[in-house]
Every structure is written in C-alpha cells, then in structure tokens.
C-alpha cells in the first residue's frame, strides 16, 4: 500500500474517514460478548500508548492530507484506559490529520462509579461523546448478563456523563431470558425518559464461542424469545422510540435528527476507516484500490508485532468489485436512508438486476426511490433474507 | 478332482446376528484353511457395506479341507448366501448348488422370521438340515426351549442339534463332524455332458467378471469353450480356481465341485444367476430348472445434488450395473430435481446398498425420491402398462383400473408387542391370513400391499417392537385396488418428486402427514407459503407456512463487515443445495425427510 496524493474524488469520500482504536481489556468477560476482549491483571499503559502512537504514525503516512471526521475508542472497555493515554493518542491524531470543524470523538464507557470519576479527564483529553453499556434497567437481568454494575450505579454514572459530555448514548440489550413484551415496554419507557438523543437497542444474540453460546449448545439458557416474540419486541422498540422522537436510523440505533453516531455512519455508508489495536479491522482506499486491513487478535501478539516491525497490520486484502458491492449492500441496507444504487453499480461494476429487486418490492420489503434503495421497516426486520435474495 | 463321497456342499441359514459369519470364520480357522495371522472377522463378507450392516449381499464360497474322524479328508464347500428377502432368488439359486444346510439359531433369541424364510428355501431345495444352537454359553441361553421351537415352527427334529459357541469356538469340531456324517454327498455323472449352475458372478478389477459355478454333471476344464444356455453366449475358460478363500488355480472341476471361472466376459450383466453352463459342443440337452430373470420391484429416482455431477453419476451407475444385473436404470428428467436416473431394485435394502455405494465409492451426493413399486395400469383400450414413476401417471379417464403388487409377509414378534404390530399391518391395508403362537412368540402372516411396505414399514416395525420383531416377505400377486396419484403443491406449484401413488382410503391421512411434515422441513420464506396435497384438482390437505417475521443481525459495525460478508457468501453458495420451485426454495434434506413417513 502506498499513499494517495492528489487522487480524484474517490467513492469513500461519500462516507467519510474515521479512526477506530481498539482497547481489548475488560474487568470481566460478559457471557454474551463475542468481541475481542480480555481480562488482564496488569496492563502496562505506557507500552500500549507507544504502540498506538506508532500505528497512528504509520496510518498517517498512508493517508496524508485526508480530513479526519471521527475517532472512536471501542473495546473491550476503553473507559479503563488511562486518560493520559487517551490524551496522548488524541494529541497525535490532531498532529497527524487535519480534522473537520466539529470532529466526533467517542469513547465506550462502562457505567460504573470508577469510570464516572475519570469522565472529566477524558473530556479534557478531547472526548466529546460517550456510549455507555448500561444493558438493562433491572438488577436481576444485569446480573444474569454478567454485568458488574447496578441500575443505581449506571444511572449515577450516566448523570455524570450527561453533564460532562456534549453527547451521550447508552446501550440496552433486549430479548433477554423470560423477558415479556410488557416487561420490555416498561423498561424501554424508563430508558426513553433517561435518554438524551441517542440509544442503541440490541436484541440479545447468542454467539458461538461465548459462555451463553456454550450453555445454549448444551440445551441450557431457556426462556429466550421465539421468533414471533422477538419480532414483537422489535416492533415495540420501533414504535416507542419513534413516538419518543428517536426513530431508528439503523437496525439497532435510534437518534434524534442530527444526533446519529457519525463514526458508525462511516461504516454503514461505506466510507474509509483505519483500525488500530488488537483485532481491529479497517477499510482504506489507496491508489484506487480498497483494502481490507486486519490486526492480530491476541493483545500480546499485536503489541509485539507493532514494537518489532512498526506495523500492526496483517497482510491486507484487496477487495474486488463484488466484495465491495456485497459490503455496501450489507451495511447500507441497515440504514433507514438506504444506499445509492449508482454508487453500488460503480463499486460492483454492474447494476442490481430488476428481477432481483422486483419480488422484494412486491413483498413490500424494499423501496426504490430515485437513486436510493432502502429497506422498509418490514424489510429491515428480515434483512438477512433480503440480502440473500439480492446477492 | 475329488471323489463324490468325499465332498460335502452346504450353506448356513441364520437370522442376522445369530452368528452365521462367526461360525463360518471358525470353520475356516479351525481347519487351518486360512493362517491365523491372515484371519479377519467375517472373512466372507468382502464389501465394506456387508461388514458394516452385518449382511451378505453377494454369495461367496470357501473350500475347506477337513480330516475327519473316519480317517478320510473331506472337501467341504460352504456357500455363504445372501440373508435378506431382497435377494430371495439369489438365495434360492445358492441353495440349489448345495445339498445341505446348517440351521444356526441363537439359543436365547430363538427362531426369527428371516430364518424361517431361508429354511423353507433350503427345504424346497431338498436339503438335509443340521440344527445348530449358537451362543450356548450365554446366561440367557435356553437350548431346550429353542429346540422345541424349531420342532414346533419348522417341523424339524432338533433333538440332536449341535450346541456351540461360535465366538469361543466351543462345539466347532462337532459341527465339522456333523457336516461329514449327517449331510449327504453330492451326486453326479462325470461322463455325462457338462451341466453346471451359475451361482453368482461379480466384477474383479484384475480378473474381470468372475463366475461362481457348481458342477452338476460332467467335467469343466481350463481352456474349454462353454455356452451360457440363457444368453447363448460362448466363452473360453481362461482360469479355473477354487476359493480357500484365496484363489487357488485348478485344472478341472468335476461333479459336486464348486469353484470359479473367468473368461472374456465383459460385464456381469452377461451372466445370469441360475443360468446353466455347458460345453459349446456336445452340450447337455436340458437346462437346470428354476431360472428366473432378475425383476426389479422397487423403483426410485436418483438425482445428483449438484447438477454438475450428472455425468459422474451416469458413469458410476454404469459401473455398478456391470456388477449387478438386478439393478436397472434409465435416465429421468424432473422439473424439480433436474437430470437423474429412475432406478429399479430388488427391494429396499438393495436400494439402500446401491445408494450407499454410489455415495461412498463414487463420492456423489444424491437425492433419493420416494420409492415406489410397479403398478399395472389397465387402460380402457385393453392395454396394460407398467407404471414405475407416479409422475408418469396418465389421465385417469384413460384408465380402467390399477393393479398393485401384494406380498405375503411373515412377522414373528414377542406377545407383548403383537397388538401394535397387528395395528400397523391393519393401517397398511394388510389382510390377516394366519396368527399362531410358539411359546410367547406370535407368528402373524399378512397379505400386504408392497407399496405400503416400501415406505418405512420395516423401521416402524422395529421401533414398535423395540427391535424384537422379525419380518420377511415374498411377492404373491398383482391385485386391483382403488389407487390414486397424490400430488404435492408448494406455493401452488406441483413438486413432481413428491408425488406418490396411494390408496384412496389412506390418501387423506398420507396427505395430511405429508403437508404437516413439509411445513416443518421447508424454511420460512419472506412470504407465506401454502402447502397442499391434492388428488387431481381436489385439495385433500393444506397447511400454511407463515412468513419469516424476523431475521436480522443485531450488531454490524466496521469490524463485522468481513465476517458478515463471508457468511452471506456462504449462504449464497448454500442456495445451490436448495431446489427452486417457483419462488420457493426447498432444501434437499426435505425431500428425503418428507418421504420417511410415519403412521
């Protein structure tokens, strides 16, 4: 890969350019989580800082003169990062790329009292948005989800966050064991009274390789919702959020107009993003080729390779037109706004044939509106089926 | 060549698991026919499938030299016969090639239906029969009860039955002595024109077609030119050998002897089990009686899962046909399944064996359609047509009536399961012909339609009797009944591979069961799908598969793109394993599972 100076307007620019930084550590591993997260007794924060800075320098050299839209600290639990490390990373980011006037700098935070104490320092480092993993608003469910915090702690931490940051969001998981439509309706109503302008509401997914996945495979983990109840819960979610002025802008994300996560929109709009940290993925368009980048997953391996070679990248993959088309469909159709058919044709080198679109339109699952292709609310609920029909 | 009175030819009649193969192994071992280091279990079952299923499909033979107590060394020829009803004709021919049988009965299990059928074949062939009670060392062994049962059920004096344990070797010398002293020597005239029976044949990669023969009269020599009386083909004998069980060349085979020959025979199809072999010149005047051409009774379609495998399937079927004259095939096109073959088999086991061999030995993935029998369509214009495939059913207005094959089934079952077994037979349109008891075991004889048996009758019988029922049948006749073609419509499109011939009175039940099963087997689509069973234009059962309501990935961010894309592409590839009917995709497993009907 080499840098791209003075290239003509490229497709990624319609999605923007963001930087993702992965912090792989948590205080404990949640039983549903299949993210690259680890529990470590001691963490040499200074060493991690140096590795992040090395990676920023490397990516910066490849993407000189690009304007950076967003930075996102994800994990893991990045609120466990030393605020000095966050500050050093953001200083280096600002020194590397020109940034838009109002860059969005998000940090995922655990809603515990310890983290709340650091919020001011994160603010000082430049973080202007937090996304908090509240997950449930009742203590019994928090425990069964393996969370260490209580509802009261979460509320307290959230209140600190609201007064500290310009923008705050929180996550809830629904479709939990034995959760009824009535339970969820009540809980979501409470959540909406707390919410400011953004909410991520995820249906619990049992992933293989997690503690829940193992229990489920052994016939445990009873009381998960049927497809019909899951559909009801999803519909309730859409309705209540819509009524509260936070309509879905993506399958699981709700916001008031203008408060959408700009960083995540880069993914869904097929923009470019650099991924730094263990297991981080990136998409970078360089000299007209779009590359899929990936870093080694084990934290120690990533750290070593960065220190030894000055690069945390595994061998990047050049995406074909078909790859790019599939990714754009996969991502773009998650958004309420949909995707651009002309961009899709440009990427994949061929237009979506009308015989694939037509049956789905007939069924009321998708809409073609000028250049826009979007899923209807009904279509978004069966998006996997829609995608299978379109590829 | 051996003196007639020093030859004993015999077969072993036994139910599966009663120890036939183990006994054969012991006889071979104890006479030193095979060196101990070369012994492997079930010497005579050469195919993997035979070993795995514990059944014999092809006849096999072994020549044993036994120095008897009378000071003479005898030649004992054991023909291991197929033990399954599907191969009843092959069994009957093997039986004609020997003079006596060992009837092996498990001393704790007693006589089973299959034993019965084979023992009757042996009696038909005029055999002397020596009863042998096996597994005599097991705590559950009840030799007296089983002896009595043999007398009551078969009408055979079992007072001097040989008591053995084939596993431990107990009593094996007594078996060898009994063969020599109680079974008759063969008869035959070595000066008469050659008359030999073709007992079986198979294809060998090195030797080509190998023919097993039993010489009745005359002498067969290496280099002789012989004629097959049925096909009238003439071959030169390139090789003459006996199996010990490894091949040992000999120069001639005389009356009473059993051996193998090879010539320039191209395919097994050119040899007919039961045919008579004689010399080209100075041949015998009359062929041996009882020859029957192979007649497939169960048909099904075999289609490649991947359409690209059609040519490999064609080649595999051709190769298997070379080695199995009883298996027929012709090309078939199905709207649902594409290009494939309609194949005929001797029975369900034969079908399964061939399908397994195609899948395993030729590495093919196959879809098997509903097995069906051959119906005789009596058309209004007087013509009689064979219907092998429900898809070919002509318009009803041209048909006067339909005959279907019936079987005479013998079922033996412990008393406590009898009620359920009778119910099953009743459900399958059976007519009871006889019901008798031997101790606490009942023997039911039923007249049943073969069509009702080719489904899953045997599986059902085993499950309702916890494996204790045994079952055997012979095809008895063709008889008229009220038969109709039931079609299955998925989203209003007929699925030809699922259509079947059923009895009018059973159609509603079958139709209901089928649509309910399909409702579970077809994955939900993004729209609702009616699934119907119909006779002609009349719907007899209907289910609606509701539309998929929710199928969406909750989280999908930058780090998920690669993984989700791969998943999507995998699903796209998986679509090839689905069959498209109009807008509906039906997974292949659904065809197979739908046809395994219960009730």
Image (cartoon, coloured by chain):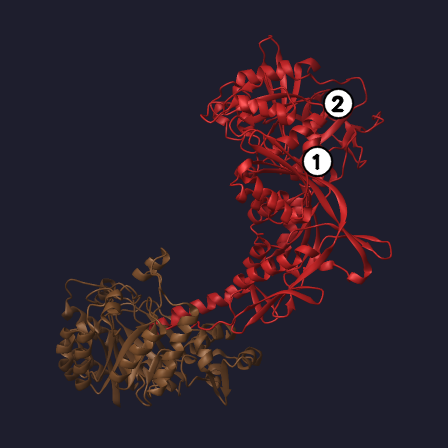
Q: Closer to the camera: disc 2 or disc 1?
A: 1
Residue B3: give x, y in percent of width and height.
70, 14
Q: Which residue is mark 1?
A: B89
The numbered mark 2 sits on a residue in which chain? Answer: B
Note the chain letter of the brown one. Answer: A
The answer to whether dots 2 and 1 both sit on one chain is yes
Residue B320: give x, y in percent of width and height.
65, 45
Q: Nearer the viewer, residue A311 or B457?
A: B457
Q: Earlier in the sequence, mark 2 or mark 1?
A: 1
Location of residue B43 with respect to B481 vertically, above or below: above
Q: Nearer the viewer, residue B513 or B252?
A: B513
Colour assigned to chain B in the rendering is: red
| Residue B557 visible in the snapshot | no
Location of residue B455 with respect to B544 vertically, above or below: above
Q: Which residue is mark 2?
A: B216
Location of residue B335 with respect to A154 vertically, above or below: above
- SS at circle 2: strand
Using the numbered discs, state the Cα–Cα distance from disc 2 to disc 1 in whole angstroms: 19 Å
- SS at circle 1: helix
Residue B484: give x, y in percent of width and height.
72, 58
Q: Which mark is residue A106?
A: none
Image quadrant in which you'd find residue B421:
top right
């Amino acid at each position: 890969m080499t840098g791209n100076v003075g290239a003509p307007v490229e497709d990624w620019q319609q999605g923007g350019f963001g930087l993702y930084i992965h912090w792989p550590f948590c205080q404990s591993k949640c039983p549903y989580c299949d993210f690259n997260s680890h529990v470590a007794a001691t963490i040499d924060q200074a060493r991690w800082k140096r590795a992040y800075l090395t990676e920023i320098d490397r990516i910066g050299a490849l993407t000189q003169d690009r304007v950076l839209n967003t930075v996102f600290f994800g994990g893991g639990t990045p609120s466990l990062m030393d605020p000095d490390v966050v500050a050093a990373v953001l200083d280096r980011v600002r020194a590397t790329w020109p940034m838009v006037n109002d860059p969005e700098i998000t940090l995922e935070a655990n809603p515990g009292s310890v983290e709340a104490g650091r919020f001011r320092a994160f603010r000082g480092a430049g973080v202007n948005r937090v996304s908090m993993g509240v997950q449930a608003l009742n203590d019994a469910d928090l425990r069964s989800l393996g969370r260490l915090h209580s509802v009261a702690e979460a509320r307290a931490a959230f209140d600190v966050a609201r007064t500290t940051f310009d923008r705050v969001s929180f996550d809830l998981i629904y479709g939990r064991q034995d959760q009824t439509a009535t339970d969820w309706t009540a809980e979501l109503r409470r959540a909406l009274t707390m919410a400011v302008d953004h909410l991520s509401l995820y249906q619990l997914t049992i992933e293989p390789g997690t503690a829940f996945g193992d229990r489920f495979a052994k016939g445990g983990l009873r009381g998960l919702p049927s497809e019909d109840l899951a559909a009801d819960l999803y519909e309730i979610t859409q309705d209540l959020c819509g009524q509260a002025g936070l309509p879905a802008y993506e399958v699981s994300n709700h916001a008031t107009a203008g408060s959408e996560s700009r960083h995540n929109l880069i993914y869904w709009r097929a923009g470019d993003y650099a991924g730094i940290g263990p297991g981080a993925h990136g998409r970078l368009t360089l000299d007209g080729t779009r590359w899929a980048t990936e870093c080694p997953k084990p934290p120690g391996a990533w750290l070593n390779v960065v220190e030894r070679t000055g690069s945390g990248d595994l061998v990047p993959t050049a995406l074909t037109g078909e790859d790019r088309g599939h990714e754009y469909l996969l991502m773009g159709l998650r958004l309420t706004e949909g995707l651009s058919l002309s961009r899709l044709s440009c990427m994949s080198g061929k237009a979506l044939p009308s015989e694939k679109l037509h049956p789905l339109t007939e069924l009321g699952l998708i809409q073609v509106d000028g250049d826009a292709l979007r899923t209807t609310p009904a279509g978004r609920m069966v998006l996997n089926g829609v995608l299978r029909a379109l590829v | 060549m051996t003196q007639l009175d020093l030859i004993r030819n015999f077969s072993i009649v036994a139910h599966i698991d009663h120890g036939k193969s183990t006994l054969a192994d012991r006889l071979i071992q104890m006479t030193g026919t095979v060196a101990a280091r070369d012994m492997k279990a079930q010497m005579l079952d050469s195919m993997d499938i035979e070993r795995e299923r514990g059944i014999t499909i092809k006849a096999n033979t072994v020549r044993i030299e036994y120095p008897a107590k009378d000071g003479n060394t005898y030649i004992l020829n054991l023909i291991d016969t197929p033990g399954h009803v599907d191969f009843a004709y092959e069994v009957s021919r093997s039986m004609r090639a020997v003079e006596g049988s060992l009837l092996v009965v498990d001393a704790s299990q007693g006589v089973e239906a299959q034993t019965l059928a084979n023992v009757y074949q042996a009696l038909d062939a005029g055999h002397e029969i020596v009863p042998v009670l096996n597994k005599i060392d097991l705590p559950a062994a009840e030799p007296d009860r089983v002896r009595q049962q043999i007398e009551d059920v078969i009408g055979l004096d079992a007072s001097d039955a040989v008591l053995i344990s084939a596993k431990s070797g107990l009593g094996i010398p007594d078996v060898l002595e009994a063969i020599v002293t109680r079974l008759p020597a063969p008869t035959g005239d070595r000066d008469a024109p050659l008359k030999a029976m073709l007992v079986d044949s198979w294809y060998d990669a090195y030797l080509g077609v190998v023919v097993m023969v039993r010489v009745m009269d005359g002498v067969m020599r290496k280099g002789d030119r012989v004629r097959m009386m049925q096909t009238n083909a003439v071959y030169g004998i390139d090789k003459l050998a006996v199996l010990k069980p490894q091949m040992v060349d000999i120069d001639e085979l005389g009356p009473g002897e059993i051996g193998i020959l090879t010539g320039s025979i191209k395919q097994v199809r050119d040899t007919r089990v039961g045919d008579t072999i004689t010399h080209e010149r100075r041949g015998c005047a009359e062929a041996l009686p009882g020859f029957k051409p192979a007649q497939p009774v169960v048909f099904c379609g075999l289609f490649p899962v991947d359409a690209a495998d059609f040519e490999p399937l064609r080649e595999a079927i051709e190769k298997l046909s070379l080695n199995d004259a009883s298996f027929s095939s012709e090309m078939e096109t199905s709207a649902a399944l594409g290009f494939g073959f309609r194949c005929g088999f001797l029975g369900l086991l034969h079908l399964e064996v061939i399908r397994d061999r195609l899948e395993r030995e030729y590495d093919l993935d196959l879809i098997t359609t509903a097995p069906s029998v051959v119906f005789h369509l009596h058309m209004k214009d007087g013509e009689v047509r064979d219907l092998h495939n429900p898809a070919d059913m002509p318009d009803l207005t041209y048909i006067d009536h339909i005959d279907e094959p019936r079987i005479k089934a013998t079922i033996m079952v412990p008393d406590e399961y009898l009620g359920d077994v009778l119910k099953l037979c009743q459900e399958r349109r059976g007519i009871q012909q006889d019901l008798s008891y031997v101790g606490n075991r009942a023997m039911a004889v039923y007249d049943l339609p073969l069509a009702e048996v080719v489904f899953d009758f045997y599986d059902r019988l085993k499950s309702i009797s916890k494996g204790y029922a045994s079952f055997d049948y012979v095809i008895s006749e063709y008889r008229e009944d009220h038969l109709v073609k039931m079609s299955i419509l998925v989203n209003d499109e007929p699925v030809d591979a699922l259509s079947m011939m059923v009895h009018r009175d059973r159609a509603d039940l079958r139709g209901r069961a089928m649509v309910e099963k399909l409702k579970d087997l077809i994955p939900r689509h993004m729209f609702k799908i009616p699934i119907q069973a119909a006779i002609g234009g009349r719907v007899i059962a209907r289910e609606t598969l509701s539309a998929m309501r929710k199928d969406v990935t909750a989280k999908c961010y930058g780090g998920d793109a690669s993984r989700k894309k791969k998943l999507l592409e995998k699903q796209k590839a998986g679509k090839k394993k689905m069959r498209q009917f109009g807008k509906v995709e039906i997974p292949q497993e659904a065809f197979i599972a739908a046809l395994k009907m219960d009730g």
